[in-house]
């Protein structure tokens, strides 16, 4: 049982960090290609976050969907890839001696494109397989970067039968934290909270400057909440094209561990009990957040 002083500290960027450590050129397969060819890098990244103070390892399964793999003829490799990702996170957790493993479930087809995502009932059928498979070994389901209500509903429908905690994270407009990337009001998330009763609602993969306004809205819902933001200047038009690569996104130069940790501590003061980082937020950021949380009297659980 958590109290108001307990904070769950997520890891930071997984796919981006794996790609950076590999030194490989970005491809539409993103970190999946690295995981196939250099799985030891995935182990290293998970271990780095635990050493930094994180208490959750997020599996490298965000982009490993049937539809994305099918584009490159690798759809039959999905079970093998899911196993590699889950086992890597579990091994790092076991080596660390504590922590939880969260099964990352990303958007279908492409990130930030709810307009091309299948409608909820159709998406549910696609999500069923990966969510059921990953739930077998992991501690919780983490649905990430949902950009519309309908997109989120598809993943939540597939999670209804799962007997483990389900967290869902939404991405909001780069410059207006009261709106999802679809243009819908963040307030509408409460409809999903009441319908599906997720264990936590989070804001992720958004500029940290807009997160506080989102959390103020979510704080009125009857659900645990938190946030983990990205370090991009904004989501560029180039990244919204078919099968983009992450080099279409521009990394901020001003979001060092000190500046990012200030945002995180503001979220905690707003009542967030689950915090961490997303794209371009690395182990050094998480390490400083852990230090600040401990110094401020919070207990990292």
Image (tube, grey):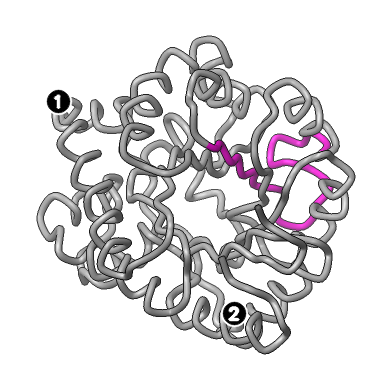
The residue at the point 37 percent across, 42 percent down is 138
What residue is disc 2 on?
Answer: 289
Q: Would you say 263 lies left or right of 69 here? A: right
Segment tinted magenta in the rendering = 165-185
Tag 1 secondary structure:
helix
- Mark 1 or 2, closer to the camera: 2
In x, y percent, where is residue 89?
Answer: 30, 55
The residue at the point 43 percent across, 48 percent down is 102
Tag 2 secondary structure:
helix
Kindly identify which numbered label has been placed on residue 123: none
Residue 254 figure quarter: bottom right
What residue is disc 1 on?
Answer: 76
In x, y percent, where is residue 29?
Answer: 27, 45
In x, y percent, where is residue 151?
Answer: 60, 26
Between the residue at mark 1 and the residue at mark 2, the CA separation in whole angstroms equals 40 Å
Does residue 236 sit above or below 156 in this rendering? Answer: below
Query: Is 169 a magenta residue?
Result: yes
Residue 103 figure quarter: top left
């Amino acid at each position: 049982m958590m109290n108001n002083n307990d904070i769950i500290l997520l890891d930071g960027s997984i796919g981006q960090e794996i790609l950076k450590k590999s030194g490989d050129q970005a491809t539409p397969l993103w970190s999946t290609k690295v995981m196939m060819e250099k799985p030891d890098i995935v182990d290293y990244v998970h271990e780095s976050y635990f050493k930094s103070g994180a208490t959750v390892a997020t599996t490298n399964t965000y982009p490993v969907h049937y539809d994305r793999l099918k584009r490159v003829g690798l759809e039959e490799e999905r079970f093998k890839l899911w196993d590699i990702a889950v086992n890597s996170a579990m091994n790092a957790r076991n080596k660390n001696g504590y922590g939880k493993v969260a099964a990352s479930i990303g958007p279908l087809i492409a990130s930030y494109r709810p307009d091309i995502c299948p409608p909820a009932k159709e998406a549910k059928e696609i999500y069923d397989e990966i969510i059921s498979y990953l739930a077998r070994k992991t501690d919780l389901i983490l649905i990430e970067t949902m950009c519309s209500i309908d997109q989120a509903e598809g993943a939540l429908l597939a999670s209804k039968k799962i007997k483990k905690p389900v967290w869902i994270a939404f991405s909001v407009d780069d410059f207006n934290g009261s709106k999802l990337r679809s243009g819908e009001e963040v307030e509408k998330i409460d409809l999903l909270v009441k319908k599906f009763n997720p264990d936590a609602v989070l804001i992720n993969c958004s500029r940290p400057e807009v997160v506080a306004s989102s959390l103020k809205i979510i704080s009125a819902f009857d659900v645990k909440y938190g946030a983990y933001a990205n370090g991009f200047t904004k989501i560029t038009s180039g990244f919204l094209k078919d099968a983009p690569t992450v080099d279409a996104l521009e990394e901020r130069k001003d979001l060092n561990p000190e500046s990012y940790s200030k945002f995180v501590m503001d979220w905690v003061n707003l009542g967030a009990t689950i915090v961490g980082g997303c794209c371009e937020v690395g182990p050094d950021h998480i390490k400083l957040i852990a230090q600040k949380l401990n110094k401020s009297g919070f207990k990292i659980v």
